[in-house]
Image (cartoon, rainbow, N blue to C red):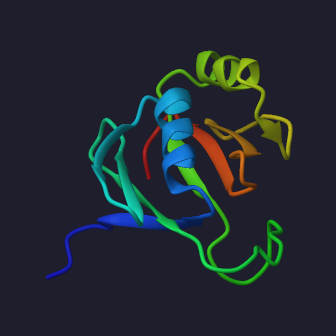
């Protein structure tokens, strides 16, 4: 039986540097590192594997086919929004609040699309 998504992978030209950004900005923890990959873990146990990239990025747009973003759940949207804003992230949208859900889209230093999300009521 399948029980959960264990991790999501991101290919990066400098996996150690990108992993450190996630540690500094979001408080993730590095739980494994090798010459070709770094695993970072969020406080709830979800993980991202950042692997050494091969080749060049072809581009990334919000609605291209395939995986498009990673959503980061937060407990205090306004405080976390202010914190990442102060860290100088590039925002792709203004914050939106609708039907008890707060979201904002932005990118990590390599252009991978992320978004903060806080729901009044979980799905």
Q: Is residue 3 left or right of residue 50?
A: left
* 117 vs 86, nearest the viewer: 86
Q: Residue at x 61, y 35 (%)?
A: 100
* 56 vs 63, nearest the viewer: 56
Q: Residue at x 56, y 29 (%)?
A: 25
In the rendered view, tell whether residue 31 sits above or below residue 77: below
Quadrant occupied by the N terminus: bottom left
Residue 22 position in % (x across, y down): 52, 39
Corner quadrant of residue 29:
top left
Q: Is residue 6 left or right of residue 53?
A: left
Corner quadrant of residue 95:
top right
How many numbered discs? 0
Residue 110 position in % (x across, y down): 72, 53
Q: Residue at x 75, y 55 (%)?
A: 111
Residue 65 position in % (x across, y down): 73, 84
Residue 82 position in % (x across, y down): 70, 17
Q: Is residue 70 left or right of residue 37?
A: right
* 68 vs 51, nearest the viewer: 51
* 104 vs 45, nearest the viewer: 45
């Amino acid at each position: 039986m399948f029980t959960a998504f264990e991790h999501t992978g991101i290919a990066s030209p400098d996996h150690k540097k990108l992993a450190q950004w996630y540690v500094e900005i979001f408080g993730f923890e590095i739980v494994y590192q090798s010459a070709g990959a770094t695993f970072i873990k969020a406080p709830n146990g979800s993980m991202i594997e950042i692997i050494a990239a091969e080749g060049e990025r072809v581009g990334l747009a919000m609605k291209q086919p395939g995986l498009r973003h990673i959503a980061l759940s937060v407990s205090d949207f306004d405080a976390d929004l202010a914190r990442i804003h102060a860290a100088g992230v590039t925002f792709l949208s203004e914050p939106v609040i609708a039907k008890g859900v707060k979201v904002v889209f932005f990118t990590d230093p390599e252009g991978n699309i992320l978004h903060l999300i806080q729901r009044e009521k979980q799905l």
